[in-house]
Image (cartoon, rainbow, N blue to C red):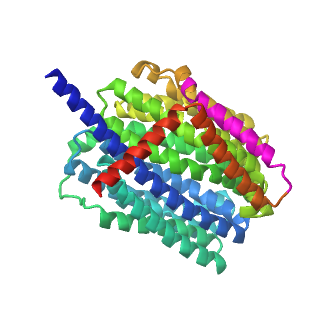
Amino acid sequence: MILYEIEKRLKRDLDNKTIVTSNIIWRFLERVLAQLVGFVVSIIIARILNPEIYGTVALITVFTRILQVFVDSGLGNSLIQKKDADDIDFSTVFYTNLIFCFFLYCLIFIVAPIISSFYGDQMMTPYIRVLGLTVLISGIKNVQQAYVSKHMLFRKFFFSTLGGTVVAGIIGMYMAFNGAGVWALIAQQVINLLIDTIILWITVKWRPVKKFSFARLKKLYSFGWKLLVSALLDTGYNEIRQLLIGKFYTSSDLAFYNQGERFPKVIIENIDASIDSVLLPTMSREQDDREHIKMMVRRSIQVSTYIMAPLMIGLIFISEPLVRVLLTYKWLPAVFFLRIFCISFLFYPIHTANLNAINAVGRSDLFLKLEIAKKTVGLILLIITINISVKAMAYSVLISTFTSQIINSWPNKKLLGYRYVEQMKDILPNLIMAFIMGVTVYIIGVVNCTDILRIIIQIIVGVIFYLICSALFKNESYIYLMTIVKDYFLMMKKRS
């Protein structure tokens, strides 16, 4: 009987590993290809448009992002976290989202002139009203998205996201080339989400049933409202910087700040978001096995850092020639912000894994308390730096990042027995290897040649150097990833 239980557990662990690996690969491919297409499109458009235009759109996007939190957070995550969520749960959330998103759109439509007056530009009113449609579209998409995450069907995201990105990119470039200015960027965002939603509804077979349960909604809301408030705090805190930069400084300052964030964020959204979206539903299935969750958190932190550390540190050292080549000299002020955000995003795996663990065990109350603590620290730093300069505000982001990772990891000392000191020890080998690689890349950068050739040489040498170091020192994350890749290809070979 004992042997049977051990065999059953081993089989379950193997099945889970296969499912998780497959979904991470699909999610990663989706993010990589979509972000790659989007990144190329944004570079082409940035070379056409002036920084001031980007600054204007960035200001408008602040408000739609805040409203978007009401759609993307809370009830959707509640559906993923709930073990026995059924069609009634999903349908209840779907109808609730539709009504609420319609209300949000009406709100932003009405207040658009007020926002425009605040920035002294009435031309912003139609921009806000059109971009606000993304909130309405998201209400239709949100539950389908939660269904895909809940049932680990991330292959569906691959087709919807890529389709939306490609179509929107083509339209955005066409409009930019033809002098559409701000409308090119707005159309790109709206069409991207619209196509994404249409494809997701075609490929995912779930449809809402004609049932609604206030009791189910109340139960889901009891978990989700804390995540919603947490997300609002996080988004509001991040976006208030944009609002203040746009109000007290120039549109160009805001554009450089945003563009500096964009480069490392592309990498983060490809890697961290891929693991994040798979990690929560996987941990939620194992929420009663704390030791197993600890193992997943540890592995997630190690592997994510192993991948992201060389990318972020390498990007710091090649940032200036990279901006010159991709965006031209007019965007060089963005280099400073790019480097700051690279350091900040480097530690995101610690944030992601710890917070997912807290959510998976159903402690959204702790999640909310952590957000209040982190944002209190961040706002104090923001108040101190706001009247100094935009660069000082960027430095405050960096300081806030370090304090936030300590705060995020604190509850798991008790919940999982996984202390912050242990987490730092787990990622230290990856950080040391990445730093040595970065120094090597920097030394190579002094070679007298064209920017493009210099970047190519630095990337090739950096990758080879990092992989050789990983193999020589038998890095744990490197061995784990190699094993996963081999197992996955063996599995695909057997299926074929």
Compared with residue 25, is residue 84 higher up or lower down, i.e. above or below? above
Quadrant of image for the N terminus: top left
Q: Can you name the residue that lies furthest to the right here? A: 448
Q: Can you name the residue that lies furthest to the bottom here? A: 178
Q: Is residue 457 visible?
A: yes
Compared with residue 292, is residue 49 higher up or lower down, i.e. above or below? below
Residue range (magenta): 425-448
Left or right: residue 390 compared with residue 427: right
Q: Residue at (59%, 44%) from the top-left corner?
A: 238
Residue 273 in magenta?
A: no
Q: Position of residue 403 (x, y in %)?
A: 61, 28
Residue 57, by quadrant, is bottom right
Magenta region's main secondary structure?
Answer: helix
Residue 309, by quadrant, is top right
**Closest to the observer: 225 or 20?**
20
Left or right: residue 462 compared with residue 231: right
Residue 432 in magenta?
A: yes
Q: Is residue 148 visible?
A: no
Q: Residue at (79%, 40%) from the top-left corner?
A: 388
**Closest to the observer: 56 or 129?**
56
Residue 374, by quadrant, is top right
